Amino acid sequence: MSIKLRIILIFTVFVSSIVVLGITTIYLNRQQAEYFTNARSYVQFRENLGESKRVFVEKVQALDYYVYLSQKSEIHNFRDKRRELTDMLDKMNEFGLFAGFLAELRTLLGEFELSAGEVVDLAETGRRVDAVRLADEVLPGKLEGIRAFLSEGILLVDERVRVSHNTAVSFQMRLATFFIIFFFLVLVFVSIMGYSLYRAVVTPLKKLEQATDAVGKGNLDHRLKLKTKSEFRKISDSFNRMIQDLKEYQLKITQMGKMAAVGELSGGVAHEINNPLTGILGHSQLILQKIPEENPLYQTVKKMERAALRCRAIVSGLLDFSRKEKFDFKVHDLRDIINETLILCQTEAVSKGIKITKQYVSKDLRVTASARNLQQVFLNIIQNSMQAMPDGGRITIKVSRTKRENRDYLLTEFTDTGTGLTEEAASRAFEPFYTTKDIGQGTGLGLSISYRIMKNHNGLIEISSSGTGRGATVSVYIPSNLINQI
């Protein structure tokens, strides 16, 4: 998982947690308010019911005082309590609770009111004895029924109050438990993702630090290996490519330094050797003219002459390698340079059974170069390819345009089907005097001279091979805008 995805995931979970928490809090607060509202309603209903019982008791007392003690003022108190009791019942009815209970209570109170009304009517008409007798016969049973019913109602409401209170408390506990579990899960997730993010960042940084220390100490074979699919994988690949390029540049700089040193050394050595070598060759040829071929010394002197001629060829190559000649840069068509080069080696190619083909990918092949020196480079490459195919084969010359390191080049590739090169031979191909040919078949300076020529053209020359017996490819890069660099 990439670091970007981890951060997005953590942010998404964080925002989602806030949203879920907000929605849940609103919902639970409403539920909690509803629970506590119900509990409050039950409590107020209980209070009103208790108050109704008190008013009813006072109403009965006023009726007793009026009927039994003939206190006429109590009849007004009786009627006031009746209206107050009716108001209390109406008020309790507004809660919307215990509708059946209230309806039955109204029925009982209504029956009591009818009987009490008859008693009051008898007392008001002067028939107090009949009123007392009716009150003793009818009212006690109804009175006891109402009191018992009110007591049961109060117990019922108390139970509902207790249940409602317990429900509200239980809901608070569940709410607290929910928030604890929710925050715990979010904390666990954030901790896991945070630790994962920490490892995804810190571990690669430590390995990158170790890799930079190793490279800083000169170990260009060190590679940064990260087992991750995050953005650090791209950094790792870029770092490894950078080290590989740095290693190649170091090898090129080393090669250039070697060739510069060898060039200077070769020039001095060639001049020192050339004079005595001329004397040896001259005297050898003079002796060969003086003695007949049948003389036993003739073949010995002949070997001396061949050895001297070979030495002179090597000295000539050294002088060419060390000579700082002036390049004549002009605009040429690369086709013409290639065709003139093939004319020089066409006869040898035909005699060895080697077929040379040309492929021009681009139409515009104009280039600013030294035609004679560039022809020498091509000739060296083709001769090496032909020597690598003693039993015949094929050489393909392909010219195309390419871009490398933000520069435009004309790329000329010489691909043969010869004996190929080992990895070591390919890496040392441009070293002076290095050769894979048999003794007497090469000086090992052809590609070195070609390397120097391409350097003077601000170009490149590279050689690659898939291995022994798989042929080789020599790539020559000539800058397209060379005229602006000279």
Image (cartoon, rainbow, N blue to C red):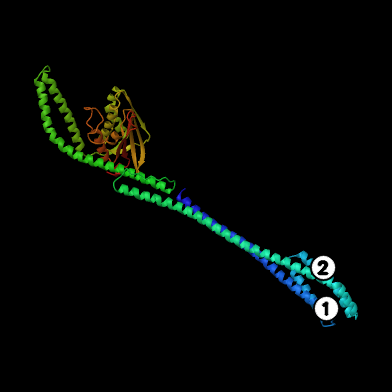
Comparing 244 with 205, the one in front is 205
* Residue at (20, 35) in percent of width and height: 320
Disc 1 marks which residue?
Answer: 64
Locate residue 321, reporting x and y percent: 21, 36
Q: Is residue 17 above or below residue 249?
A: below
Q: Is residue 305 above or below residue 34?
A: above
Disc 2 marks which residue?
Answer: 107
Left or right of residue 167: residue 6: left
Q: CA distance from mark 2 to mark 1?
A: 22 Å
Please identify the quarter of the rendering in which residue 268 is found.
Answer: top left
Q: Residues within 10 Å of mark 2 (few under 14, many from 20)?
A: few
Residue type at mark 2? Thr
Can residue 26 be seen here?
Answer: no
* Residue at (82, 68) in percent of width and height: 107
Comparing 50 with 228, the one in front is 50
Most distant residue in the left direction: 290
Left or right of residue 477: residue 279: left
For the C terminus, give its image quadrant: top left
Comparing 286 with 30, the one in front is 30
Can residue 348 be seen here?
Answer: yes
Q: Which one is earlier in the sequence, the residue at label 2 or at label 1?
A: 1
Residue type at mark 1? Asp
Locate residue 291, reporting x and y percent: 9, 19
Q: Residues within 10 Å of mark 1 (few under 14, many from 20)?
A: some
Judged from the image, the secondary structure of the residue bearing numbered disc 1 is helix
* Residue at (39, 47) in percent of width and height: 235
Locate residue 189, reporting x and y percent: 51, 54
Judged from the image, the secondary structure of the residue bearing numbered disc 2 is helix
